[in-house]
Amino acid sequence: MAISDWTAFVDQTDARMAEVRKGAPDLAKGFGALAAAATKPGVLDAKTKELIALAIGITARCDGCLAYHARAAARHGASREEILEVIGVSIYMGGGPSMIYGAEALAAFDGLAAVTGG
């Protein structure tokens, strides 16, 4: 999916996710706890974990994942050059479809980094 306004896409996705949280609070709470534990800085810092998550989002072809993890990577100080390296590894592991979603991830990062100050 070609998304032209990543900020609007994140806002729309946030609203949809709020409905899921409201309808399935236990599930949402469990997923939130899993996400917090997985992204908590440890041996790998938070930025590195977000770059990994972005790579997985590219290879899984998940638009929402691109948006959330590009924004989080920007918030944790990722550079455009780091995003391009993540895209390179994703293409290596995922082939042509990852090339397309890598371009989407770069657009997401560019659109969201400007808004988040990354």
Image (spheres, helix red, strand yellow):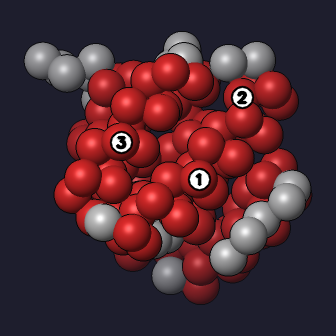
Q: Amino acid at mark 3?
A: Gly
Q: Position of residue 48 (x, y in %)?
A: 31, 26
Which residue position holds label 3?
A: 88
Which residue position holds label 2?
A: 113
Q: Is residue 86 left or right of residue 19?
A: left
Which residue position holds label 1?
A: 103
Secondary structure beneath label 3: helix
Q: Is residue 99 above or below residue 43?
A: below
Q: Is residue 102 left or right of residue 11?
A: left
Q: CA distance from mark 3 to mark 2?
A: 19 Å
Q: Earlier in the sequence, mark 2 or mark 1?
A: 1
Q: Is residue 104 above or below residue 49?
A: below
Q: Earlier in the sequence, mark 1 or mark 3?
A: 3
Q: Amino acid at mark 2?
A: Ala
Residue at 59% over, 79% down: 20
Q: Quadrant of residue 77?
A: top right
Q: Is residue 84 above or below residue 61?
A: above
Check the picture and name the quadrant holding the C terminus: top right
Q: Is residue 17 left or right of residue 61?
A: right
Tell me if mark 2 has few (under 14), some (14-19) or many (20+) residues whose alpha carbon lies within 10 angstroms of its own: many
Comparing 59 with 21, the one in front is 59
Comparing 63 with 91, the one in front is 91
Q: CA distance from mark 2 to mark 1?
A: 15 Å
Residue at 59% over, 53% down: 103
Q: Position of residue 91 (x, y in %)?
A: 33, 54
Which of the two marks, 3 or 2, is nearer to us in this view? 3
Disc 3 vs disc 2: Cβ atoms closer than 8 Å? no
